[in-house]
Amino acid sequence: MVTRTIEAYDNELLTVASGSPSLRPGSAIINNSDSPDGTIYEFSGGAPVTVTLEDTSANQDVFNDDDYGNHRITDGAGLVDTGKGVEAESLFYMRALDNCGNPTGPTITVRVYSQDNNYGNVWGFNSDTPLEAGTQYVKVAGSNTGSASYSSFTADPVCYAEGTLIDTPDGPVPVEMLEPEHLVWTFDHGPVPVKWVRSEAHQLSMTAADQKPILIGAGALGAGLPDRDLVVSPQHRILVGGHGQLQDLFPSEAYVPAKSLTALKGIRQMKGKKAINWVHFACERHEVVMANGCLSESLLLGPMVLRSMTAHDRSAMTKIFGLAKPHDLALNGPLARDCLSVGAARRHIAKGLKARKQRQDDVIRKWDEDAALEKRDAALMRDIRAMDLPGLKSVA
């Protein structure tokens, strides 16, 4: 038996929208099989809570569907009663709707939780991408099997792979060699001390493909940026729109999640990766740091990250940084740069790539026009020579 935690939203926060073609408006999200594709839900906003359970199953790294007897709630955080048997019931694949009611952005996976061996008794849900309050989402597909690794239910702290070189006043240092009070170089504030650092070995065999590490190949962000391959967690934010980093694709400096960049050449999800050693470090403030020669972020200790930590680590955080006031802010905020969502970043990239192609097409068209003009001038000179007109030699 092991104790596990999952992040969960109250299912009453995601309800059928008034304009939905199916189900009763205002009713909470239910299981996949009773929710037809095309159903429209609206997220009213709110924060997730941490639910604790005991897992006595054969594979205690996975929160299973159809195995409620081996998942017993020990702290339901007000969403579900202690002692209840629960399961990861089913999956919804959803897309946000724009102001015209058209699907936009990436497909979001929403997982619903049920209790009492009753697939219709849904009490909570979670999603792989944060939902936006007041936004409507249309169900485009689903699955009756909701099983997933526990790691996929919690926040994904921004991490660097072991071996990443972080710039310091003494030169680049492997991230795993950093210690508290070690100075690192920051773009905004010069050398600042590391306040907290943590290394963790992660098995990835049960990790969903879209949660696998991101490889940013050398030169993928710009000339020599990064200067060697950089491996980060999917939600790790990379600076774009300035300092040579995808400057032609974004109109201004911003942070974007690494997983939003996978449409670009040289950047991919490492779907075959089986294990990795992650390292994350936090400074007194959220900082722009240099990792393998490109600008990236230090750890932002926001509410979701803190909830994913052990009680011991949370206690250590408050001793170092104090309590956030109000409690929904980061301990070491504010953000070093504005942050774009995955969907917003991908839209900028699509628009920027289209403009980049247009510029390339314009250059090629100009080359073709110049080549045609040169060919025409050469033909004209041949015709003049063939005529052997008086004074030709002086012209030539």
Image (cartoon, rainbow, N blue to C red):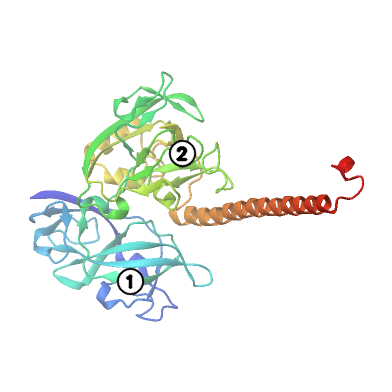
Q: Is residue 250 left or right of residue 227?
A: right
Residue 95 x, y percent position in the rendering: 41, 66
- Which residue was labeled with disc 2? 219
Residue 148 in the image: above or below residue 294 = below
Q: Position of residue 303 (x, y in %)?
A: 35, 46
Three-letter amino acid code at the position of disc 1: Ala
> Is 99 rendered above or below residue 312?
below
Residue type at mark 2: give it.
Gly
Q: Residue furthest right?
A: 390
Q: Nearer the viewer, residue 130 or 252?
A: 252
Question: Which mark is in front, 2 or 1?
Answer: 2
Residue placed at 20% from the left, 50% from the top? 205
**Label 1 crowd bin: few (<14), some (14–19), many (20+), radius 10 Å:** some
Q: Which mark is residue 141?
A: 1
Q: Is residue 351 in view? A: yes
Q: Residues within 10 Å of mark 2 (few under 14, many from 20)?
A: some
Quadrant of the snapshot with the C terminus: top right
Q: Which residue does the image show at 48% across and 50% down from the upper left?
A: 340
Under circle 2, the secondary element is loop
- In this rendering, the count of numbered labels is 2
What residue appears at the point 22 percent right and 46 percent down from the top-left corner?
Answer: 274
Q: Residue furthest top?
A: 170
Give the quadrant of residue 149. Answer: bottom left
Task: Tell me where residue 202 appears, x and y as whole percent.
Answer: 22, 42
Query: Which label's residue is closer to the chain start, 2 or 1?
Result: 1
CA distance separating discs 2 and 1: 37 Å
Q: Is residue 29 visible?
A: no
Mark identifier at residue 123: none
- Viewer-nearest residue: 138 or 172: 172
Q: Position of residue 65 (x, y in %)?
A: 17, 64
Label 1: which secondary element: strand
